[in-house]
Amino acid sequence: MKVEKLLSKVDRSSKRSMIDALRPSMRALIKDGLSKHSDVDVKVAVASCISEITRITAPDAPYDDNQIRDVFKLIVSTFEGLGDQSSRSYAKRASILETASKVRSCVIMLDLECDALIVEMFEHFLKSVRDYHLDSVFPSMGSIMVLVIEESEEIPVEMLKPLLARVKKDNTDVLPIARNLSERVLVKSAERLKPYLLLAVTALGESLDTYTKVVSAVCKGTTATNENNDENTYGLQELISPRCICYRSLGEISVQNIG
């Protein structure tokens, strides 16, 4: 897509006149004919263009609330294919993920109460993560999940179910890399999760013994001093860049260090 290449070259510091010049492209990209195209690669290309637009216009949302909901449905759908590195659209999917992580655009889904879409996104991450993702995709997935948890006013059981499912001791279908990612996210979000995690375990009809030691450590507030000090297991590695722009649909900017 020619538009995609041009958008990738536009800097976030561009003047308002440049953003105004993008308006026709912005409108065209959200038309059903493109965003709901039958060709998956076309849909990913459209999502890639829209992802670049969110980067350029941040911290302002590029579309109204109803449109941005559809935008995130499209963006989240691209994450489903991250497990297939041989796909012709893999590089674009990975780029969309990295942009979402850097711009922190996924907090908009919280503002718009897209709870089911957030759960779907978590599932896509944990189902598609692979060993070859360690350089960029793995940390981007982790940073997005940590960000969503940290920014949530309340943390529902449904949001925690995908993470807890990957750290069940008897779940032999889980890839080690998916378990690793789940544990890192749980530990990185330990303070925020402490009031919610045991409630979630109980609501699911389970006990702490059902899960790996990470869950018990988070519930007890002992993640930093747990007997197992392997950072690869307990997720003490930095998942989020120390200073990032928090992108809100209301145009609010929050620069914070959560590392």
Image (cartoon, rainbow, N blue to C red):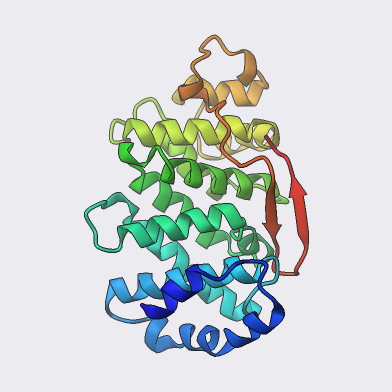
In the image, residue 11 sits, relative to residue 211, either above or below, namely: below
| Residue located at (43% from left, 41% from top) | 138
The one nearer the camera, 194 or 46, is 46
In this rendering, position of residue 144 left or right of residue 75: right
Relative image position of residue 177 (x, y in whole percent)? 36, 34
Location of residue 18 (image quadrant):
bottom right
Q: In the displayed structure, would residue 129 be above or below residue 4?
A: above
Look at the image and tell me in which quarter the C terminus lies: top right
Q: How many marks?
A: 0
Dividing the image into 4 quarters, which one contains the N terminus?
Answer: bottom left
Image quadrant where residue 35 sits = bottom left
Residue drawn 59% across and 59% down?
106
| Residue 82 in the image, given as x and y percentages of width and height | 34, 53
- Residue 60 position (above or below residue 183): below
Outermost residue, top direction?
A: 227
Provide residue 182's location: percent of width, then percent of height: 47, 36
Task: Please indicate whether residue 146 sits to the left or right of residue 46 in the image.
Answer: right
Q: Nearer the viewer, residue 196 or 17?
A: 17
In this rendering, position of residue 149 left or right of residue 30: right
Q: Residue at x 52, y 58 (%)?
A: 99
Nearest the eye: 222 or 107: 107
Name the quadrant containing residue 54: bottom right
